[in-house]
Image (cartoon, rainbow, N blue to C red):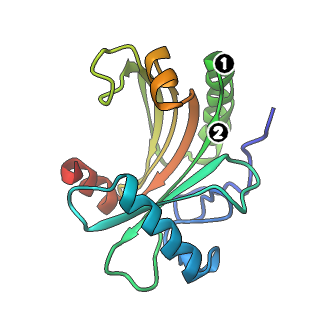
Amino acid sequence: LISFSTKIFADETEFQIEGMSLGDSLLDYYSEKEIKKAKAKVEKSWSYKDKTYTPLSFHKKLKTYNSVQVNYKTQDDDFTIESVSGSRTYKKNIEDCYKKQDEIVDELTGFFEDAEKLGYGTYEHFYDKSGETTIKGVSFIFKSGAEVLIQCTDWSKKFTRKKKWHDELRISIDTKEFLDFLDYAY
């Protein structure tokens, strides 16, 4: 099993996913050409209704995750990271996802002593109107309002067949400003 432990520190400004932290420039990790290519791909497939932020997905130059999603303010020429998440696929194996999630949460609990830990239990995914897709999540919320979220998504068989989406573990770090944006982005 892959270890999700990379450098982990005591607050949100130092937490890293594939080496990336909140406030870093995406240009430190990808060229402007790679960023523009990722942006063009996202614009064809999906985006937020509100264009304040631009989401990008990357699948190359990764060591721990299958993919990384980054959000930056659309008008920011420095591509400052406001949100970054890494995901790892668990094909037909949600129990291993839950096990890895528990390991990560236990590890982070010791590092994020000043953060408020919230367990959300298991709930239905808003995207699947059948109610068959579920999410199990745990958050660490910092005094700044930033949040680290560790969640497992158990996609229904229908979504796996139709969309080729597989169960996954996702670890995210988001600024408070980005989280507030998500309240009205869709």
Q: Give x and y (percent) for residue 39.
A: 44, 68
Amino acid of disc 2: Arg
Residue at 27% across, 51% down: 182
| 106 up-or-down from 30: above or below | above
Residue positioned 64% across, 18% down in the render: 92
Instruction: State whether residue 153 appears in this view.
Output: yes
Label 1 amino acid?
A: Asn
Picture coordinates of residue 71, whole percent (x, y):
42, 63
Question: Residues under labels 1 and 2: Cα distance?
Answer: 12 Å
Of residue 120 and residue 43, the one placed in the foreground of this image is: 43
Residue 17 is left or right of residue 117, and the answer is right
Give residue 7's quadrant in the image. bottom right
Give the residue pinned by disc 2: 88
Q: How many marks?
A: 2
Image-based side of 172 in relation to 43, left or right: right
- Residue tagged 1: 93
> Relative to 15, does residue 159 appear above or below in the rendering?
above
- First of labels 1, 2 by sequence position: 2
Task: Please tell me whether mark 2 sits on a helix, a strand or a loop.
Answer: strand
Residue under the image location 46 percent in, 61 percent down: 41
